[in-house]
Image (cartoon, grey):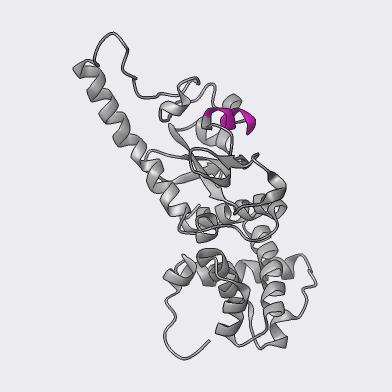
């Protein structure tokens, strides 16, 4: 890149120390497993930190490969190879990050909410992924966090046409949460979640019910902040351009990075 300071926190979403630690973890993993990595960096005078920076920039800001290639004065095919190689290395290095939803549910109350990942208009999927609520083709992703808004886990993505409560069942989370204490919005009223009290047809809500709804909304705001932090990875917010079958593992990779950023 050209001269001038690089603001890693903005470019990658990770602190300088996190980027250095992640690069070290990747290199240690390569050495420990005696992995043979294509010499992609040496061809363009890039070390692991540089290649990691390129990959994180693509994920964080959803830039095109050509734009990033121009920034580093390398070719677009080189960026493509760097991206695919380093993404797999990050996934391996962070494979033990975090805890499972079942482990978290057994030890703390959780908040569950659904969010969506736009996929762009794809003729082959028809209306399977079309969300009438959001008026776009997307995938539905269930998000779990604790009461402080700290990300715990996300589900496998399901077609965007599915309602949140249906998506909870499709992902297998409904069975995991049967004995758990968890909060959610009224979309999950058919589950065992603690949800707001809806207004009956015959009367208004009592003062106690209104106050309880207010307190519940205050608690549930934590998951909105969690979702907003996830969408800072703009590849999950502004439209996914790659092959659709590669999206689920990419979402899993970003979740690993977000858990790593939060210190799991």
Residue 2 sits above or below residue 50 on the image: below
- Left or right, 173 with reference to 39: left
Which is the main secondary structure of the residues drawn in magenta? helix
Q: Nearer the viewer, residue 146 or 173?
A: 173
- Left or right, 79 with reference to 147: right
Residue at 49% across / 25% down in the picture? 180
- Residue at the extreme bottom of the image, as rendered: 3
- Locate residue 116, reporting x and y percent: 52, 45
Residue at 48% across / 38% down in the picture? 133
Q: Is residue 120 visible?
A: yes
Q: Nearer the viewer, residue 77 or 100?
A: 77
- Residue at the extreme top of the image, as rendered: 202
Which region of the structure is painted magenta?
165-171
- Left or right, 83 with reference to 1: right
- Locate residue 61, reporting x and y percent: 50, 66
Residue 205 sits above or below residue 79 on the image: above
Please say whether residue 32 is one of the residues in the magenta stretch. Answer: no
Residue 241 sits above or below residue 223 on the image: below
Residue at 65% across / 39% down in the picture? 128
Q: Is residue 50 visible?
A: no
- Locate residue 15, reporting x and y percent: 44, 68
Q: Nearer the viewer, residue 149 or 63?
A: 63
Residue 245 sits above or below residue 147 on the image: below
Figure disc tally: 0
- Left or right, 77 with reference to 240: right
- Locate residue 119, reporting x and y percent: 60, 52
- Residue at the extreme left of the image, as rendered: 207
């Amino acid at each position: 890149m050209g001269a001038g300071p690089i603001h890693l926190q903005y470019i990658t979403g990770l602190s300088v120390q996190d980027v250095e630690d992640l690069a070290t973890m990747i290199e240690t993993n390569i050495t420990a497993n005696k992995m043979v990595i294509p010499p992609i960096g040496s061809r363009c005078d890039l070390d692991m930190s540089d290649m990691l920076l390129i990959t994180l920039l693509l994920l964080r800001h959803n830039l095109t490969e050509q734009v990033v290639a121009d920034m580093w004065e390398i070719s677009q095919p080189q960026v493509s190879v760097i991206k695919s190689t380093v993404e797999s290395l990050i996934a391996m290095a962070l494979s033990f990050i975090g805890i499972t939803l079942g482990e978290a549910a057994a030890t703390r109350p959780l908040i569950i909410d659904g969010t969506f990942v736009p996929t762009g208009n794809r003729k082959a999927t028809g209306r399977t992924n079309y969300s009438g609520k959001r008026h776009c083709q997307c995938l539905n992703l269930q998000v779990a966090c604790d009461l402080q808004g700290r990300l715990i886990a996300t589900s496998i993505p399901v077609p965007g046409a599915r309602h949140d409560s249906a998506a909870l069942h499709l992902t297998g989370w409904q069975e995991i949460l049967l004995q758990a204490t968890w909060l959610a919005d009224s979309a999950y009223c058919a589950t065992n979640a603690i949800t707001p009290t809806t207004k009956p047809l015959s009367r208004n809500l009592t003062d106690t019910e209104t106050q309880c709804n207010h307190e519940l909304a205050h608690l549930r705001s934590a998951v909105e902040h969690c979702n907003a932090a996830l969408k800072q990875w703009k590849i999950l917010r502004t439209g996914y351009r790659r092959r659709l079958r590669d999206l689920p593992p990419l979402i899993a990779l970003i979740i690993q990075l977000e858990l790593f950023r939060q210190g799991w």
